[in-house]
Amino acid sequence: MHPVRGASAPSAPPPSVYPIVDLVFINPQDAIRVISESIGREARRQLVGEVVRAWVDEIPEPELVGQYAKTLADLDEDDLSMLAAWHASLEVGQPIANRDFLVRVFPALGEHRREAMKIAAGFRGEDAFDAGVGEEQALRAILPHLSDESAELIAAEAVELYCWDRLGSEN
């Protein structure tokens, strides 16, 4: 079709008077749960590990020692020995694989306290999984304590894990 002489070309549509809004149909915590149910065991454990590490990063400083003590209370002797060996690698004294000792020296770890907490929480998670506590239960317990920002970051990682899991990883 040829344009008619003297007719102007169609103009672009007028700009929208409505703001552009991203539509979100699921909150990040629910997205993490849904994805965790759709991936294999190895990917699911990695996802739970990411959630636990994010939770540790968000524990308020005054509560860190108490959370560490609670976490150590559930560890077996093997886990306590491995944690004491990790303490030894920091050269903060001669560590003893004893809950009371590890809690007492926790403040001396300085900038490594959160890493110690992540290790202890990881041991606790593995022990819980071995005892039959499912990843779903762990997520249900931890996800509500995450900030929206952390949950959004983990949801993005969950999507990556989902793709990794579905594109042929050995699970």
Image: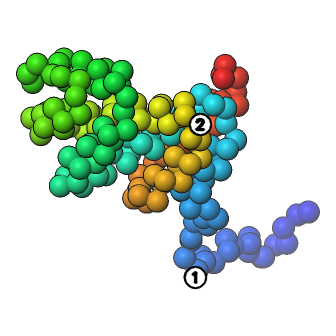
Mark 1 Cα-neighbour bin, 10 Å: few <14, some 14–19, many ≥20 = few
Q: Is residue 144 above or below residue 167?
A: below
* Residue placed most toward the observer, 94 or 108: 94
Q: Is residue 34 above or below residue 93?
A: below
Marks 2 and 1, Cα distance to the nearest angstrom? 55 Å
Please name the residue shown 25% across and 39% down the image.
114
Q: Amino acid at mark 2?
A: Gly
Please name the residue shown 54% across and 76% down the image.
19
> How far across and down, in percent of the image, does residue 149 sit?
41, 56
Residue placed under numbered mark 2 in the picture: 132
Q: Looking at this rendering, what residue extends furthest in the bottom direction?
A: 17
| The image quarter in which residue 17 lies | bottom right
Whether residue 60 sits left or right of residue 131 in the image: it is: left
Please name the residue shown 67% across and 32% down the image.
40
Please name the residue shown 31% across and 20% down the image.
82
* Residue placed most toward the observer, 142 or 69: 69
Residue placed under numbered mark 1 in the picture: 17
> How far across and down, in percent of the image, does residue 154 sit?
48, 46
User: Element at badge 1?
Assistant: loop
Q: Amino acid at mark 1?
A: Val
